[in-house]
Amino acid sequence: MKNLFILVLSILTFNCYANQVSVDENIKAIKSYIETLHQQDKFSGVVLITKDDNIVLKESYGYAHIGLSVANKPSTKFSFASIGKTFTAIAILQLLEQKKLSLSDTVGKFLPNYPNEVVRNSVTIQQLLNHTSGIPNYMTAKYYESSKDLYRNIDDLASLYQNEPLNFTPGAKFSYTNSGYVILGLIIEKLSGEQYDDYIKSHIFDVAGIVNTGNFDRDHPVADAAQGYTLSDIKPNNWRINTLLGSVKGGPAGGGFTTVDDLNAFVKALLSHKLLSKDTLPILLNRTSPEASYGNGMQFFESNGHQIFGHSGGHFGVGTEWSVYKDLGYKVFLLTNRDAEQGFYDVRYFIRKQLTGSTPFIESYLFTNEVIDVALNKGFSSAKELVNKGDIKLFESTINYKGYQLLSQKKFQLAIEMFNFQVMYFSDSFDAYDSLAEAYMEAGQIDLAIKNYQHSLKLNPQNKNAIDQLEKLKKR
């Protein structure tokens, strides 16, 4: 019996030690990877990882303010973009608990004067939550070309979407739209009798015990807040501050500020039923259908059989995410103040690879970045050799993004080569030929631009951009 007890104790001790070594090695690899990116000026932000609610990594990198050389700190506030949608969804579900609404209620029940009759009578709370309403996104050219000061309050956005026709019949399909969450904000105000920001603060932030999160006015001083930086298309190879490109103030669709510690406290409060009851929380944390990657204000991922839920956000100069690795005990909080393609995605997928093991998707993304680096540093011939000697598929959108980045930097020949590289490996992609045509057009090679727009149209006769550009080019 004694020997058996010692054997069992030894096995338990070994398993605990082995698990600790595994955790330590994973975190060590993540830390080393991010540090390398930082040294190459490819990452700026804060990372917090917990295991069973114990902090295993908490580091800051880069600058909150490049001009003043102010470094990011773990306490730095970052714009969280669409993470704010989860706060709005929780508020709606709190009102559901109070029996002030049901998910099948239509917009018109609470907003009887909503100008679009179809929305008023057909779109439900559920469809607003899971982005199946068909309501067009208010972030159009009109929004981006206007002063954001015009849209400081929820009501100010009405002219951008309320009178627009629906993109599809409500409930027919998924299409991510910020407008639906603005409408949810209006409904929260109507049913609670409080301003949206006041409701979120008193019923979510105060309950969770967080004090550095809110929809602050970005054109006013915000203590310890990071500026967002996007690649400039005005001064190539420079960063541009994102102040004029995003919302002047956060709201129901997102755009506020937070810290990694506040997000951690928020998630703890959420999972311990301080914000939603045991009966209501599953509405937020469960998929609305087995194949859905977006539910009622929550995103869902699967990696090697491991279930992950949370919410991400991205905009010019913003890449953010909080995620819970349901069966592994990890929580990951990632706040960055650059475009998502400038480090956020790299860190997100490397962390996921270390915590859950690799997947074809992750390998494709990371391999594509390696190929692009080889192409730019050693030439496209070397990049082709790297691709051809392996069997990992390339990530088309990453190549396309890099091509447009080069184009915005006026590096026309490199952009043309990058898009030709995309065409080589995605020869059936109308978008690849459309992008290549644009690069030729910007470089003044009109005949080649026309040729590639025509080929893009051959692959997709509905490509409106190609149709419009060909009409313009043929008039030259």
Image (tube, rainbow, N blue to C red):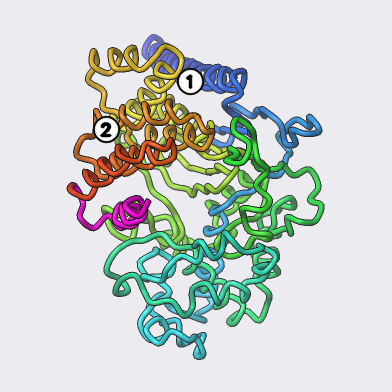
Q: Is residue 87 above or below residue 325?
A: below
Crowding at label 2, few (<14), some or many (≥20) Cα neighbours within 10 Å?
A: many
Judging by the rendered image, the residue that carries numbered circle 2 is 423
* Residue 415 in the image, given as x and y percentages of width and height: 42, 30
Residue 294 image-quadrant placement? bottom left
Question: Tag on residue 263?
Answer: none
Q: Earlier in the sequence, mark 1 or mark 2?
A: 1
Regarding mark 1 in the picture, which secondary structure is present there?
Answer: helix
Find out whether residue 206 is within the magenta segment.
no
Q: What residue is shown at x 46% (from left), y 87% (from top)? A: 109
Judging by the rendered image, the residue that carries numbered circle 1 is 26
What residue type is disc 1 on? Asn
Crowding at label 1, few (<14), some or many (≥20) Cα neighbours within 10 Å?
A: some
Q: Is residue 156 above or below residue 435?
A: below
Q: Is residue 420 above or below residue 14?
A: below
Residue 145 image-quadrant placement? bottom right
Q: What residue is shown at x 42% (from left), y 27% (from top)? A: 413
The dominant secondary structure in magenta is: helix
Q: Which residues are magenta?
A: 459-476
* Residue 242 in the image, given as x and y percentages of width and height: 65, 47
